[in-house]
Image (cartoon, rainbow, N blue to C red):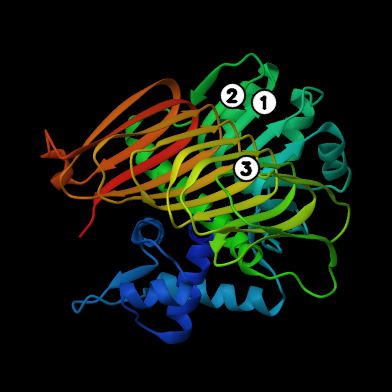
């Protein structure tokens, strides 16, 4: 194989190793030149940062016209031709181990275990456990494992260095990677766009050795989280089908407090004109519902689907403990005290009409996306967060004349905090929002914006 041909293969692999970049090349190849906005719509991308990141990664494959449109370069057209030929065979671009390896091909399916020559790909997951049995199976098939687009990856203690070296190709676009102490060095070598690597001894370090690389890593990680949450959206918006067994139904006359505990399955809490709890079973299902006369509602779930509609009154307390599954909490009339404890799974929290309130969010794993919208209040409101792992994204919106105080502390992880310039200028506002972010692991992004 010639040197030029090898360079071309390497460039193509790097360009097409991510599904968003493959989508960009395919779109420009099929539709011709496109604007930035058109590409966002074509690829169903919600934020500009994600598209900008991947456009930069395609330098040399795309060009920008004088009128601001993107189109494929000569190299991009060659890559598109290769992509078309692969698509006809139902395959995507991958790579075998070693610097001198030929391009190999492997099918890539969202959330699926993709098995084709050379690589087994596990992707698009909230968490993944890698044990000796899995790696021995991959090695016995004559393949190597590529892990991508996973929030948390944990490697078991029983995996020895030789097996890890022979069976694992790469671990990329991962927020947290936890490995035994004896695999730490190998994990550093195989990690790509991994925010933090922790060991069983509790030691945690940034996988990116230089500060200049952190921004790129965070962009990739934010993109990963967005894709994970997007992949959950159909489940968050799908009503139970008739094929599911209806297990429980009970009216809620009034609700002052709700306590939710979810180990698995799906739960949605919202507000409506009529209060009610509905529970459905798909496979195995364990649940317990208690409704008190004084307005307390308690729901425990493991493997069920629950739809909880509360009457439209301001809650005194909202409490949710989540160790697995998918949970959506949407409160339109505000809450006095909210406590969210997340060890795993995915949680979407949306609270409007907040006033003088206390919000506490504790994240040790999983994904949390919170939107907190404050009305005009007097006095002080508080947000307290503590993170030791996982991913948390908080968007806060307050009235313009609000003093926003943010204190960040902790010894690990990564926090990205953005406060409107308009809010930074408010020193003695009509109200105060005090926020404390303690980040000891994982990735947190918090934004504070003034209402327009």
Position in image of residue 113 (x %, y %):
76, 56
Quadrant of the frame with the N terminus:
bottom right
| Residue 279 appears in the picture as rendered | no
C-alpha separation, residue under disc 2 versus residue under disc 1 = 6 Å
Q: Which residue is mark 1?
A: 179
| Residue 280 appears in the picture as rendered | yes
Q: Which residue is mark 3?
A: 294
Q: Is residue 206 left or right of residue 398?
A: right
Which residue is at 26% across, 44% downward? 377
**Pointer 2 with pointer 1, Cβ within 8 A:** yes
Q: Image quadrant of residue 409?
A: top left
Tell me the element at label 3.
loop
For the residue pair 214 and 40, the one nearer the viewer reads as 40
Tell me the element at label 1.
strand
Position in image of residue 291 (x %, y %):
71, 47
Q: Is residue 432 above or below residue 306?
A: above
**Pointer 3 with pointer 2, Cβ within 8 A:** no
Q: Nearer the viewer, mark 3 or mark 2?
A: 3
Structural crowding at the residue carrying mark 2, measured as other residues with C-alpha within 10 Å and reported as few (<14), some (14–19) or many (≥20): many
Q: Is residue 22 left or right of residue 402?
A: right
Q: Which residue is mark 2?
A: 198
């Amino acid at each position: 194989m010639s040197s030029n041909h090898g360079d071309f293969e390497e460039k193509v692999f790097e360009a097409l190793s991510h599904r968003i970049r493959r989508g960009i090349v395919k779109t420009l190849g099929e539709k011709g030149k496109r604007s930035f906005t058109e590409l966002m719509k074509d690829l169903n991308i919600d934020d500009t940062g994600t598209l900008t990141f991947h456009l930069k990664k395609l330098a040399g494959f795309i060009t920008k016209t004088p009128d601001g449109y993107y189109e494929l370069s000569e190299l991009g057209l060659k890559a598109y031709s290769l992509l078309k030929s692969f698509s006809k065979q139902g395959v995507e671009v991958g790579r075998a181990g070693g610097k001198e390896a030929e391009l190999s091909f492997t099918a890539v399916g969202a959330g699926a275990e993709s098995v084709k020559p050379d690589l087994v790909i596990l992707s698009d997951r909230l968490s993944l456990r890698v044990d000796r049995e899995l790696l021995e199976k991959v090695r016995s098939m004559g393949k190597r494992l590529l892990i991508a687009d996973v929030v948390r990856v944990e490697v078991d203690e029983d995996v020895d260095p030789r097996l890890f070296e022979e069976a694992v190709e790469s671990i990329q676009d991962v927020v947290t990677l936890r490995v035994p102490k004896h695999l730490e060095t190998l994990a550093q070598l195989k990690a790509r766009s991994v925010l933090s690597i922790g060991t069983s001894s509790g030691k945690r370090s940034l996988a990116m050795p230089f500060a200049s690389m952190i921004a790129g890593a965070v962009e990739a990680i934010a993109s990963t989280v967005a894709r994970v949450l997007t992949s959950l959206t159909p489940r968050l918006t799908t009503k139970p089908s008739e094929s599911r067994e209806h297990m429980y139904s009970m009216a809620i006359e009034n609700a002052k407090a709700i306590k939710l505990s979810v180990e698995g399955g799906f739960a949605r809490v919202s507000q409506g004109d009529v209060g009610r709890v509905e529970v459905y079973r798909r496979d195995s299902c364990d649940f317990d519902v208690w409704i008190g006369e004084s307005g307390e509602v308690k729901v425990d779930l493991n493997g069920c689907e629950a739809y909880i509609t509360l009457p439209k009154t301001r809650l005194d307390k909202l409490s949710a403990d989540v160790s697995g599954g998918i949970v959506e909490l949407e409160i339109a009339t505000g809450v006095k005290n909210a406590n969210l404890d997340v060890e795993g799974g995915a949680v979407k929290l949306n609270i409007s009409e907040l006033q003088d309130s206390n919000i506490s969010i504790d994240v040790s794993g999983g994904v949390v996306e919170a939107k907190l919208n404050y009305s005009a209040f007097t006095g002080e409101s508080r947000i307290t967060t503590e993170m030791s792992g996982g991913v948390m994204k908080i968007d806060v919106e307050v009235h313009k004349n609000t003093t926003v105080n943010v204190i960040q502390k902790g010894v690990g992880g990564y926090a990205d905090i953005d406060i409107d310039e308009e809010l930074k200028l408010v020193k003695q506002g009509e109200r105060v929002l005090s926020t404390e972010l303690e980040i000891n692991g994982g990735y947190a992004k918090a934004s504070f914006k003034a209402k327009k």
